[in-house]
Image (spheres, coloured by chain):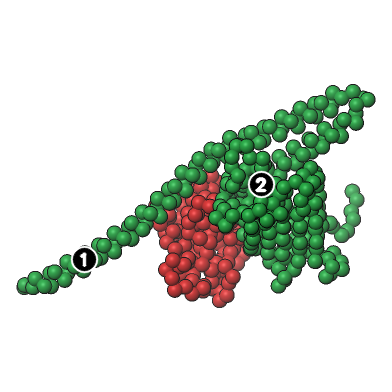
Chain colours: A green, B red
Amino acid sequence: MKTSNKELLEELKKNLSLTEKQQLQIDNLNEKLRLVNEKLKESESLKSHFISNITNEIINPFASILGLSKNIIALDDDKINNAKSMAKLIFSEAFHLDFQLINIFAAAKIEAGTNIPEIVNTDINQLIKTVIDAFAYDSEKKKIDIKFDSLISSEMKKTFYFKTDPEKLQIILKNLVSNSINYSPESNKIEIKAWIENEDLNISVTDHGKGISESDKKLIFDRFKQLDSCISSINKGYGLGLSVTKSLIDILEGKIDIQSNINQGTIVIITIPEGESLSDDIAFNGNEFLFESEEVF
Amino acid sequence: MNNLQTHYLYPSAIYISRKPFYITTILGSCIAVCLWDKKLKFGGMNHYMLPFWNGLGLASPKYGNIAIEKLIERMLFNGSKKENLIAKVFGGGEIIANQSELFNIGKRNIDIAKTILAEKNIPIIGSSVGGILGRKIWFNTENSEVILKYIKKTKK
């Protein structure tokens, strides 16, 4: 049997073009691998940064809480009025500590795959008011006016219940409001709106702060990422907030949309579909439940 | 079905119990990996939506590579030895028809399960993957039996 030179040449050409194609694919995969590798390196350095951050930001507030309460205990009876301002400072430190710990534990639970929706009838207006109240001290300090405009109650004329996970929704809103306050200049205002569209719950938080650039929008959901990460940054937190927010919205099968213009402000809109309730308990906010019958023991 | 307690597994979650349970979930292009310890006779299940964690956001079991590693980790934490583990894999259907290879999420989800389980030497002793239908499964963690029903429409 004899193969002609021509046939051999054809065969060789075919093999060569196939090899070239494969080489191209390998190059392509290598490039992807390199990018992932870079991500991993970055993630590792951010993680070590995170641990040193966390140590500072937990130990420092505790130190001031301990110091301030010691001062109150040591106050003379005639100076007891000073206790009020000190208690305010203690509250502020404890509030931020509590808020950050809630975010850290939420992130840990999401990463462990144990954070599941617990759907109950929720009074949305009340829940939003609770969140605004929680930040009253912060907003007062920066002279920021938080306006809440609920289209839900005006339509319904009575208490409106929406089936969702109040605890998760509260963490989501706390993060959005906290961000808006942090990134707003002093003496400004923040507007919160709530409405129902296509049976989905929509909540928007609008601020008039410095805004987010188009390229930064991709980064903000990164864990441990803070856009303003210089040491002198006046912004509190670990940059964990928005990645927790995003994951919690995922769990509630909702969406988050961010519209922003540099130096004009940011509008964040979340859209959450109604969940399927497994029980008929009614929650006013994340912590309280109402039961119809009274029982005394 | 007998009177076992049922746990509904949400997407991106993991559930393991040393007590007998039915773990149930609904799958479209998502995958559920069931791991079972043939010595200690208990099991666990995950439910992931995408093959790889992209390095952004939280490293949650929404992603196959993380969900499978975490499920194995949790089995070991609950007393299993790796050589006693067996796996069953379900889901990965193409519910939404896609022309592009890149968006072939169902298939890529199946591949990552096979790759990681092979890497860890955990045999897949049963599976129902691919196709165009959704699936509802009940995993009996007492005897590793999985009941499967095909469903036409799913949102996942």
B150 relative to A170 in the view: left or right:
left
Which of the labelled discs sits on residue A15, or is there none?
Answer: 1
Q: Amino acid at mark 1?
A: Asn
Can see residue A4? Answer: yes
Task: Indicate the secondary structure of the residue bearing disc 2.
Answer: helix
> Could you tell whether A275 is left or right of A296 in the image?
left
Question: Residue at image x 76%, y 61%?
Answer: A193
Name the residue tied to disc 2: A103
Viewer-proximal residue among B149 and A44: A44
- Comparing A182 with A39, the one in front is A182
Going from N to C along the chain, the mark reached first, 2 or 1, is 1
- For the residue pair B37 and B15, the one nearer the viewer reads as B15
- Image height check: is B119 above or below A95? below
Q: Amino acid at mark 2?
A: Asn
Q: Nearer the viewer, residue A263 or A189?
A: A263
Spatial CA distance of label 2 from label 1 is 56 Å
Where is residue A125, by image quadrant?
Answer: bottom right
Residue A246 x %, y %? 62, 56
Q: Quadrant of residue A169?
A: bottom right
Q: Judging from the image, what secondary structure is the residue with disc 1 in?
A: helix
Is any atom of residue A127 visible in this view?
no
